[in-house]
Image (spheres, rainbow, N blue to C red):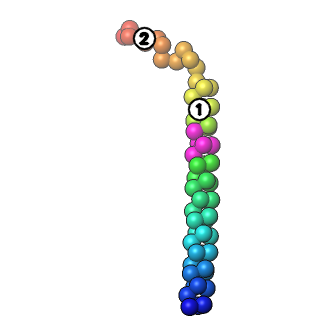
Amino acid sequence: MDMAIAALSVDMSMARTQQDLDISVLKMAMENQTAAVEETLEAIESLDPALGNNLDITA
């Protein structure tokens, strides 16, 4: 009986550690995506707002 409790405790600890690792990886992925979105928005904001407003159709 005592061995079963010890094994269960070890299994629970390993599961908690794996869950913490998974959460950390997800947080890193979210931070990377946030940085990518911010860079994209900065690039879009730096574009000339008049770009594409005029079309020269004379040949």
What is the x, y in percent for residue 41?
Answer: 59, 32
Which secondary structure, mark 1?
A: helix
Q: Looking at the image, do the residues carrying marks 2 and 1 touch, with CB atoms under 8 Å apart?
A: no
User: Circle 1: is it few (<14), some (14-19), or many (20+) Cα within 10 Å?
Assistant: few
Q: Position of residue 53 (x, y in %)?
A: 48, 13
Residue 41's tag is: 1
* Mark 2 or 1, nearer chain start: 1
- The amino acid at mark 1 is Leu
- Local packing at callout 2 (Cα closer than 10 Å; few below 14, some 14-19, many 20+) is few
In the image, what residue occupies the spot 58% across and 84% down? 5
Q: Residue at x 57, y 46 (%)?
A: 33
Which residue is disc 2 drawn over?
Answer: 56
**Quadrant occupied by the N terminus:** bottom right
Residues 47 and 20: in front is 20
**Residue numbers of the magenta segment:** 33-37
Query: Compared to 41, does 32 lie above or below?
Result: below
Q: Nearer the viewer, residue 4 or 15?
A: 4
- Give whichever of 49, 34 is nearer the camera: 34
Magenta stretch containing residue 42, yes or no?
A: no
Label 2 secondary element: loop
Q: Label 2 amino acid?
A: Asp
State the image quarter where residue 43 is shown: top right
